[in-house]
Image (cartoon, rainbow, N blue to C red):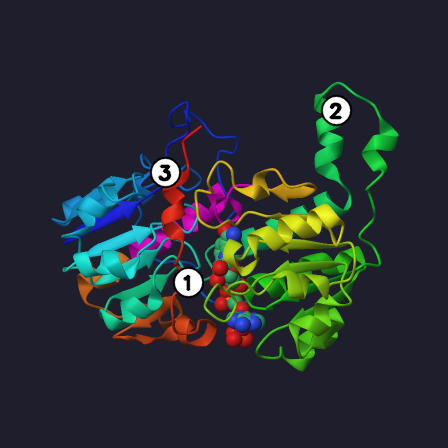
Amino acid sequence: MKVLCILYDDPKGGMPKNYPLSELPKLNKYPDGMSLPSPKAIDFTPGELLGCVSGELGLRNFLESNGHELVVTSDKDGDDCEAERELVDADVVISQPFFPFYLTKEKMEKAKNLKLAITAGIGSDHVDLQAAMDHNIDVVEVTYCNSRSVAEHIVMMILSMVRDYHNQHRIVNEGGWNIADAVQRSYDVEGMHIGTVAAGRIGLDALRKMKPFDVHLHYFDRHRLPDSIEKELNLTFHESVESMVAVCDVVTINCPLHPETENLFDTKLINKMKKGAYIVNTARGKICNREAIAEALKSGQLSGYAGDVWFPQPAPNDHIWRTMPNHGMTPHTSGTSLSAQTRYAAGVREILECVMDGTPIRNEYLIVQDGNLAGMGAHSYSKGSATSGSEEAQKYKKM
Ligand code: NDP
């Protein structure tokens, strides 16, 4: 079996010689009782960099000692990139949403042996799911592995935007003490109305994490949460996204990207938001219209926009979200903390063990199986593709 693994580049200064923490906290299970990734063994040290080329998701020894081939590369965009050349005879392809290998229909047509696409993380929109169904390529992801990591990032971004942390930090770095400059856009979140588009694992955890700030919590989702959760968090459910955004000071976006959610936040919807609201989008860049967000920040319809997701990725160096006013963007990092990497590397190994042993992959990891949406995929995605335009990723020049 040939496994092609596309990972982000190593740190510019080489792999770390040591790490800030000597060990990770021990977690026993996910909050809903689902078990953590449980491979038979691991060949890596939890808490070390695994998502970059030299980290190899800790897979090399495991695959090679079982007689399989592993090819790892970060050269993933453009017609003659290494990933595209190696894909031709690969059986399994592994990619992370942070640095996605856009598995388009054209690429699948050249990959005659390809049977399985593994997302080392959550969110398989970088795969043309329709084409995967048509070509009988299964798609799986490591459900829950980094959901709570993202929820932590959302809380950080809500607080840092509303309180205007970035501006204050910059003033300090520049040697200043201009307090009036530092606070002229700074508010408390207490009392604000905070709403999530989708209350799945991330959305619901973000609501739970915001609750102690004494805010009013709202959500919109295709399915309603149990009554007990609505009561516990004093949640207001909205039948439509329009109804929710009209009353919220902060909107956090937590649905997957699929044809139903692509371009959801366009000028029309943004203009229905409360004036001066903030958006935190850690779901997928394409859910928000690139130009509409930049325009709304310029006009003041939005007071801030933060998130870690872009389209495409890497974002071209001149992507307008890098320079628009009052943004709090990071690269796509929320789900690839060292803690999260440990979980999804173990999850990928668990999936590969199933492939080798011929045992079923957990239902909750399935997105596409045997030509249809399956498992989590059948619940959260819709048919179709959201990969168009991904070739723009080749415009990015390494800094
Ligand atoms: P879940 O599957 O637990 O939750 C997704 C939720 O989205 C479900 O409640 C689903 O609703 C809802 N949903 C789907 N379509 C719609 C729609 N059209 N309108 C409203 N709600 C919708 O996934 P997670 O919470 O773990 O992850 C969510 C997304 O976050 C991922 O798909 C990924 O894109 C992104 N993500 C980002 C990461 C990062 O590093 N920035 C890391 C991990 C994930 P229902 O089930 O009721 O149909």
Q: Residue at x 72, y 20 (%)?
A: 174
Q: Main secondary structure of the magenta part?
A: helix
Tag 2 or tag 1, which sits nearer the N-term?
A: 2
Q: Position of residue 180 (x, y in %)?
A: 88, 32
Residue 360 left/right relative to 217: left
The kind of secondary structure element at disc 2 is helix
Residue range in magenta is: 330-351
Q: Residue at x 22, y 70 (%)?
A: 136
The residue most toward the left is: 67
Tag 1 or tag 3, which sits nearer the N-term?
A: 3
Q: Position of residue 167 (x, y in %)?
A: 73, 34
Q: Residue at x 74, y 49 (%)?
A: 299
Which residue is the site of mark 1? 386
Q: Label 3 crowding class (10 Å Cα cut-off): few <14, some 14-19, many 20+?
A: many
Is any atom of residue 151 visible in this view?
yes
Q: What amino acid type is highlighted by mark number 2?
A: Val
Front disc: 3 or 2: 2
Residue 359 left/right relative to 348: left
Which residue is the site of mark 3? 52
Q: Position of residue 150 (x, y in %)?
A: 56, 53
Measure the C-alpha gap from mark 1 to mark 2: 41 Å
Q: Which mark is residue 74?
A: none
The kind of secondary structure element at disc 1 is loop
Which residue is the site of mark 2? 172
Q: What amino acid type is highlighted by mark number 1?
A: Ala
Measure the C-alpha gap from mark 3 to mark 2: 32 Å
Whether residues under marks 1 and 2 lie with C-beta atoms below 8 angstroms apart, the answer is no
